[in-house]
Image (cartoon, rainbow, N blue to C red):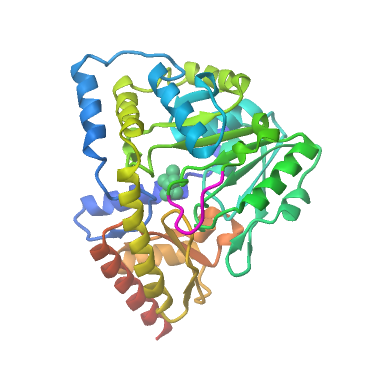
Amino acid sequence: MFSKRIRDVQPSGTVMLANKVKQMKNQGIDVISFTLGEPDFPTPEHIIDAAKQALDDGMTHYVQSTGIPPLREAVAAHVTNKNGIKAASDNILILPTKFALYGTIQALVDPGDEVIHPDPGWVSYGPMIELAGGVPVPVRMRYKDSWVWEPEDIASKVTDRTKAIILNTPSNPTGSIISADTLKAIGDIAEDHDLRIISDEIYENLVYEDTHFSIGSIERIRDRVITISGFSKSYAMTGWRVGWMVADKETVKMVNKLQQHSLTCLPAFVQMGALAALREGDECVRTMKEEFRARRNMVIPMLNEIDGVSCEMPRGAFYAFFRTDLGIPSMELADMLLQKAHVSLTPGSAFGTAGESYMRMSYAASRDELTEGIGRIARFISSLKG
Ligand code: GLU
């Protein structure tokens, strides 16, 4: 009855769990949710006002499938100035960030092609590759003092069938940053083997110690790189479903075909909200980032105080990826925590085999919730230890 493709693909660990938590909350159960990576702040008012104004102005019809011209222009200027990626409007496609990843993979991958991606890494890379008929090739990050993705590990997995490398900095779920030197080395691998690079930079504004470096800014490999980012995490706009891809014109054209045959275009009023976000500037982004930094500095020591838990200080994003010594499979532990302690975390195994002994906690929650939730986790773990 259903295609093999869709039968074989796993549901999204993050989205499925978030649905479950919503259901429990609707039943009146007091669950504290640290599952989804979603800023708890409201979308800034100037963005909402611009979208409302657009609705009042009658912007309720189809617009260009590529994105409205002023937003494409604004994104092109933004990535040129901020990320150092030289781009004009026709290098930009406006689409939901997740769909940009999906569409790019669809546009590049033929059945049997291999795509390298990080392990642990975001839950949807593997399934997106599979949905294109491709073969996911997870490359483990190593844990030294922090999580690192070694170019030699990547190079060792390149074969004749390799089409692309997906990278993600700052990383979901580890919060680690790929250094500029490593990115340059990955760029060399791509050049040597004629590969594309899909760079997921959705957490680019949540970098606490370093400066964000975009691999697409390396001029030599600019046309190999597809940079994907968006408004969700930086501007607390997760529900708006708006982001962008930056690529050579041909790639933009190809992914645009997919947009035309699926979404058609993004709602015009959503794009007007996004345009206001870029026009108004980064102050709101910085304010939210500082609060995330403060929460990170509060949460990580609290987790490390729990007997049997260890957590490195993440350098970016808003996730604590902590290890436990309980020896319970992370999926089982997540279920126990949800059912018995009413705290939801995403099991590390959802991010790949390298995540098995870990749990991901999104600290994009209020300080009160964080304190209460970590208290519940601590009490539950101590009850297991007896
Ligand atoms: N990217 C976010 C997360 O990892 C949202 C859910 C999803 O898209 O997987 O929690």
Could one spot residue 133 in this view of the protein?
no
Q: Is residue 162 magenta?
A: no
Is 144 situated left or right of 265 in this image? right
| Residue at (59, 20) in percent of width and height | 249
Q: Is residue 325 above or below residue 154?
A: below
Is 358 situated left or right of 116 in this image? left
Could one spot residue 55 in this view of the protein?
yes
Q: Is residue 34 above or below residue 18?
A: below
The percent position of residue 105, horizontal first and vertical second, equals 60, 32
Is 249 situated left or right of 281 in this image? right
The percent position of residue 204, horizontal first and vertical second, equals 47, 46
Main secondary-structure element of the magenta-colored stretch: loop
Q: Is residue 101 above or below residue 346?
A: above
The percent position of residue 74, horizontal first and vertical second, equals 41, 26
Is 286 situated left or right of 138 in this image? left
Q: Is residue 212 magenta?
A: yes
- Read off the magenta span: 206-213
Looking at the image, the residue that sits furthest to the bottom is 386
Please tell me which residue lies in front, 327 or 293: 293
